[in-house]
Amino acid sequence: MEQLQTVITRELEQSEIGKLSHELTYHKYLLNNDKIRSFFQKLSIPEYLAMHIIQESEQRDDIYAGRTYLKDIADQMQRPMRQTSRMVKALQERGLVSWSHDGDGSEGTYVTITDSGKKMLEEEEGALKKYYGKVIASYGRENLIQLLQLMKQLETVMGKEFEEMEETAIEEHETDE
């Protein structure tokens, strides 16, 4: 009897895991859908995030004299360096950022935001503030803060689990060879 109960419990857990994983995937999709993208008039979401990272870095970090290193942008956005580089190059070509390097470039390349980049970022942020101001008023500031804290915890756990799965896959691959 206990064995049957254990099997039933496991099946329910797997079913629940399936439903919950679908819900997480679905809601992540909704957060990235076209409705949110429509608030961005001149920047894509990744470009906006990169510009925001650069601006925040300039405001809080006196050590690097307003420089944001490309590696820091890639790390914060959890994107490959190659993708980040292409995106920053596109921003540079539009005159929104200035991209330079220390010495011969071997010590890293850095980005600073231009005046036109600051202006564009302000415009984009204005549209977001208008929308999210209404959302926060309806949903509640404390609810949103709690949700964001829980999402951060979830992202940490998900990242850890992903890394462990990658390590296991590498170990299994090495064992197979």
Image (cartoon, grey):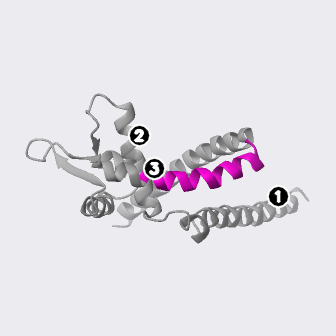
Give the quadrant of residue 69.
top left
Give the quadrant of residue 42.
bottom left
Front disc: 1 or 3: 3
Which amino acid type is marked by label 1? Thr
Residue 25 painted magenta: no
Q: Please name whichever residue, 83 or 47, is drawn nearer the observer in this view of the structure.
A: 47
Q: Please name whichever residue, 129 or 14, is drawn nearer the observer in this view of the structure.
A: 129
Residue at the disc numbered 1: 6
Residue 111 is situated, as x and y percent measured from the top left of the image, at 26, 47
Label 2, label 3: how many angstroms apart (C-alpha)? Answer: 13 Å
Give the quadrant of residue 19.
bottom right
Depicted 144 relative to depicted 1: above or below: above
Find the magenta span and give its range: 121-140
Residue at the far right in the pictured view? 1
Residue at the disc numbered 2: 56
Of labels 1 and 3, earlier in sequence is 1
Q: Which mark is residue 122?
A: 3
